[in-house]
Structure formats: C-alpha cells, structure tokens
Image (cartoon, rainbow, N blue to C red):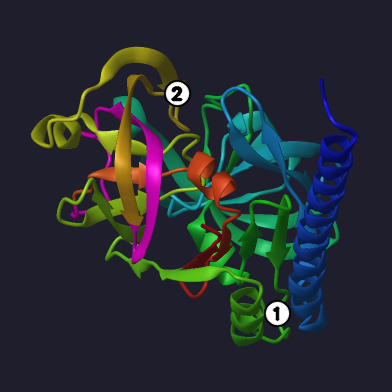
Amino acid sequence: MIRLSNIFHLRSFSKRLTVLMVILLMSTSLFASSARDVLLSQGYVEVPIYFSSHPSAILVDIAFSDGNSHPFLVDSGSTVTSFHLGSDGIAAMGMRLHNKSILNGGSGGAYIRERQATIPMIRMGQFTAYNEPAYVSMSGGTSHLFTGIIGADFLRRHQAILDVANHTLYLKPSGAYSASRLLASSLMQAGYQAIPLQRSASRHQIVMVSVNGSQATPFLFDSGASKTLVSDAYARSHGMAVEQNVDGATGATGGHFSVGRTYVNRFVVGHVAFGNQQVYTTNFSHISAGSRQVSGAIGIDWMSDHEAIVDMAHDVVFVRR
C-alpha cells in the first residue's frame, strides 16, 4: 500500500525536479543568447552548420559564383582549405589556378595532388568572401559527404568561432572588431572553462592530454575527426585493453583505416580533468602535426559532449565539464 503522504511527497519532488530542469534549460538558452549577442555586436556573421550522421562530420553549405551550393567539411585539423571539384567544376567557378601545388592528406595513407588557386567568391549563409586562396584537386572528390574542406587557414583568417553545441559558425568580415575578450568573459561567467591550444610549426592546433594519469603528450585538436582517437602505438605502450576492428573510417582524401575502441578512467585535456571517456584507436603512422608526432586526436564526439566553443584565431577552446 502507498500512503497518500508518500504520493504528495513524490508529486512535490517531481515538481521540484521539473523546475530544476526548466532553470537549467533557461540557463543554457540565456548563455547561448548572451554569447551570440556578444559576437553579433562586434560585427560577426552567424553561419548555420549541421552534422552528418554516419560518419559524424561538421558540414557547412557553400555557394559559389556559379550559383550552385555544395557541402564542405569544417576541418580545423586541415591546415589548408581545399576544393575537390575536378576540372569541370574549376572552369565553371572561374577559379584562377597558380603554379604552386602540394600533396594533401595523410589519413589512411592517402595523398592527393592539389594546385593553388584563387576562388572569386564564397558565400556561406549571410557571409561572403572574395578572392579566397585555396587548393583544388584536378581529379575531383574523394568523399560522398562533402565537396571540399574548410581548413584552419580560412577559419583563422576570418577569426572563426566554432560553436559545436549550437551548430553555428561565427565569421568576422574585414573591419569587424575582435570579440575574444568579451566572449571569454561571457563564457567564463556562464560556467565554461578555457583550455589553451598550442599552434605547431605546421600550424596545426595541439592540446596536451594525459590518459589514466600518464605524462601529458600532444594530441591534434581536430573538428574533422568524428571520434576522439589514440594511436595504436600509444594504446599498446600504456597497456590499454583494445577491442579491435569495431569500425572503419575514411580520411578526407579517401584513405581507409580500421578503428578499435577502448575506455579510460581519467582523461585530462589541458588542465581540465574528465572521467570515464570512451576513445578509439587507429594507426597514426601517416598522421602528424608537421614534424611533431602526436599521440591522438580530440574529435567532435568529445567537443559535442562538452559543448565546445573554439576560438580559432586565438587558439583556445571553452568547454563545460
């Protein structure tokens, strides 16, 4: 038998729980509005981004001077912006090709030759940029998900703020004011913690990570990685139990690699500690930050879990624990 007093107690608890949930939701909403207001007041333009489901990827739609729109991967782990359009697409968009070329890629051991080019016009939502430098693949695309990559060069040039939780990319037109100090103050007041990122000689973003109390080692900070990863060699040297071949993955330039899975009890990113983290393992022999070897990569699964907001120009990420 359930006493009436217990029923009233349960109802009262339920009401308190509902009120608490409403307060938490209002707090998140007010924060989002406050951060957005700070950025917009300083002249930033908000651009909607969206996530693909399998594999998980941050995408943005880009329109060109030919009027067509294409999905692009937002990839802070790529130091250059590249277009996988083929010769027909290049001609249609009136791109100016230059003599310089590079080998781009590395994930899964796949590289493609790309030529330097100038893109006459790029439009993302209400943001427009002209005469943008980029690299283009003459052979066309390697992914069914996206037509190219928006890399760290573009993101830094336009002072990008990547708000993963609210699916928004903020970009600063030339002449707008930097909002970094105001944004940092707003986020810290809302309970976020700032984690500084390093910029390697190759211009990759790096963060120091400690796993299960081990000495901190460099990890890539990579919005182009769907999963948070440690290298196979790192997992072996630290005695981590790995479930092999749980998934496969494809790099941005078409390379394929197998993925394992493991669990860690303590995961310290920068100076902020997190517990019970699921991470994945793969071969890192073709992945580095220039001449600097890395032990893993922080991917968008971790960024989503902790509502990451990445200030690309000032190399800092704000997170909730």
SS assignment at label 1: loop
> Label 1: few (<14), some or many (≥20) within 10 Å?
few
Is residue 57 magenta-colored? no
Q: Which stretch did the figure color magenta?
A: 269-292
* Residue 102 falls left or right of residue 291: right
Residue 14 placement, left or right of 235? right
Image position, residue 167 (x, y; %): 72, 50
| Numbered circle sitting on residue 275 | none
**Nearer the observer, 307 or 15:** 15
Q: Which residue lies furthest to the left in this view?
A: 237
In the rendered image, the vertical position of residue 164 relative to residue 141, given as above or below: below
Residue on which disc 1 sits: 174
Residue in the image at 56% along x and 60% along y: 320
Instruction: Kindly indicate the quadrant of the structure image that contains residue 8.
Output: top right
For the point 74% across and 37% down, which residue is it? 70
Which one is in front, 175 or 197? 197
**Residue toward you, 237 or 83:** 237
Q: What x and y, as percent, mark residue 203?
A: 36, 63
Q: What residue type is labelled 2?
A: Thr
Disc ID at residue 250: 2
Between tags 1 and 2, which lies in front? 2
Across and down, in percent, residue 268 comes to 32, 55
> Image check: 227 left or right of 54?
left
